[in-house]
Image (tube, grey):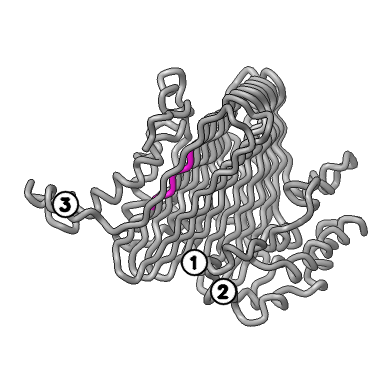
């Protein structure tokens, strides 16, 4: 099903893009890049491959009243942590709080206006898409580029003496608001970075809103990067996530995704394991109810030798929620001694819920090990009966099994006690309570910690995973 709201190709006019570009003080060349992206959005299909177009689910989406020009006052914030680099995107713009310790270590973080005002060519890269070497092929990535109105450029130098903790907050507070955020992270040799991209909303009334998230990560040799996304807005947000990473030699990179809110959510993750000895994990957990839908695509491309990759996706869906997860592990001709694994599983808690899981292996080299697993099923009644026989009521038994099902993914993230940190968010969703950004009740996560040597078993790829 590929139809969105009526007239999706007329949601946005070139005049809106021109006004946005003018407000940012962009030269004519950058304005043309935005207009080209808008034209690509109008011309491209939602799904480029005809094999998967039947899985596109955008029913009910209509952004005709939304605008990237909506402005408003800044949202309230909890007290910051002195050692954490905090970035906030809201109706007032982008704010960056860079601790002095990180500044002294050579870390730089610039908001979109500062990048736009630079003369070093970085800003054009913001508008060329995540992979300027290839043709533009993703419709919603093109829309996110055309409407980009927030952003941050983070650079961690080689041999940075301190680990860098980043908390990136996006808060929707206005009706018909569009926040399209471009994030670029360059982690130098031996750098250690842990970042959380958290998306929330205030209880403001109004029509549908749009969130575009464009994130690129480039690492030096032996860097270690963990990037967590917590998607927990209200049910009026249509979101499009696009990620792209290129790793250096012996680099460890983990994408971790917790999908807990929103209306229609679409994510596309591309990781190129370019350096020898690289390790990439893409871990995703979804909880959907009501009319929610989650559409995820993960591609890990092994280019160097002796590389490891794992993509583990698990989703729970009830009511009339929808889920689609597709994973592709591509092993290039010279990528010898590769170990790659895809796991895509979904649990359905109602007859109306639906999920599709589609793992794909593309192997061009013989000296590799690549496996996959996939399933879509209801809760195992034998497990429920076992817990009931121990005095646990059936609803509580289903909840325990479901939380353990998602915990399988979260426990493999290289972030200390991630399942415990996300437990309040998941409990709110399970109990049908909104996760609301409000004064004195901020749902932000506490500062994250990357697992050290004691966490190597969870970080390194385990060939025995089911």
Q: Disc 2, disc 1: CB below 8 Å?
A: yes
**Rendered view: 378 above or below 279:** below
Task: Evaluate whether residue 224 shows in this view.
Answer: no
Q: Nearer the viewer, residue 16 or 242?
A: 242
Q: Nearer the viewer, residue 268 or 147?
A: 268
The residue sitting at the bottom extreme is 6
SS under mark 3: helix
10 Å crowding of disc 3: few (<14), some (14-19), many (20+): few
Q: Quadrant of residue 50?
A: bottom right
10 Å crowding of disc 1: few (<14), some (14-19), many (20+): many
- The residue indicated by pointer 3 is 382
Mark-to-mark CA distance, 3 and 2: 39 Å
Mark 3 vs mark 2: which is more N-terminal? 2
> Is 117 on the left-hand or right-hand side of 130?
right
Q: Which residues are magenta?
A: 341-345
**Front position among marks 1 and 3:** 3
Q: Which mark is residue 61?
A: 2
- The residue indicated by pointer 1 is 263
Mark-to-mark CA distance, 1 and 3: 33 Å
């Amino acid at each position: 099903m590929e139809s969105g709201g009526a007239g999706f190709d007329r949601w946005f006019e070139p005049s809106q893009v021109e006004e946005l570009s003018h407000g940012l003080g962009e030269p004519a060349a950058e304005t043309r890049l935005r207009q080209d992206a808008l034209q690509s959005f109008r011309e491209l299909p939602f799904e480029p491959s005809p094999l998967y177009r039947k899985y596109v689910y955008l029913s009910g989406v209509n952004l005709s009243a939304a605008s990237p020009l909506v402005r408003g006052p800044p949202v309230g914030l909890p007290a910051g942590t002195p050692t954490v680099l905090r970035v906030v995107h809201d109706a007032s713009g982008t704010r960056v709080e860079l601790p002095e310790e990180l500044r002294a270590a050579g870390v730089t973080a610039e908001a979109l206006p500062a990048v736009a005002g630079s003369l070093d060519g970085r800003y054009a890269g913001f508008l060329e898409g995540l992979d300027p070497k290839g043709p533009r092929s993703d419709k919603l990535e093109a829309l996110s580029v055309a409407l980009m109105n927030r952003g941050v450029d983070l650079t961690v130098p080689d041999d940075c003496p301190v680990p860098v903790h980043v908390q990136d907050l996006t808060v929707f507070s206005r009706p018909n608001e569009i926040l399209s955020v471009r994030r670029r992270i360059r982690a130098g040799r031996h750098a250690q970075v842990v970042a959380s991209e958290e998306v929330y909303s205030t209880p403001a009334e109004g029509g549908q809103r749009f969130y575009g998230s464009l994130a690129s990560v480039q690492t030096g040799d032996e860097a270690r990067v963990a990037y967590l996304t917590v998607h927990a807005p209200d049910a009026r947000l249509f979101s499009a996530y696009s990620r792209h990473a290129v790793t250096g030699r012996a680099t460890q990179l983990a994408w971790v995704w917790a999908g807990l809110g929103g209306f229609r959510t679409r994510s596309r993750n591309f990781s190129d394991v370019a350096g020898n000895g690289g390790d990439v994990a893409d871990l995703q957990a979804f909880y959907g109810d009501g009319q929610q839908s989650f559409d995820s695509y993960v591609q890990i491309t092994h280019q160097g030798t002796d590389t490891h990759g794992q993509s583990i996706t698990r989703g729970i869906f009830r009511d009339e929620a929808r889920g689609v997860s597709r994973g592709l592990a591509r092993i290039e001709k010279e990528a010898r001694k590769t170990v790659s694994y895809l796991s895509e599983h979904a649990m359905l808690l109602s007859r109306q819920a639906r999920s599709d899981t589609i793992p794909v292996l593309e192997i061009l080299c013989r000296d590799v090990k690549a496996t996959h697993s996939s399933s879509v099923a209801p809760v195992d009644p034998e497990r429920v009966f076992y817990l009931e026989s121990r005095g646990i009521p059936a609803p509580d038994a289903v909840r325990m099994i479901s939380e353990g099902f998602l915990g399988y993914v979260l426990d493999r993230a290289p972030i200390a006690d991630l399942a415990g940190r996300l437990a309040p968010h998941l409990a709110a969703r399970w109990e049908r309570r909104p996760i609301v950004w409000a004064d004195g009740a901020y749902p932000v996560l506490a500062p994250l910690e990357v697992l050290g040597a004691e966490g190597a078993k969870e970080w390194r790829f385990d060939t025995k995973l089911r």
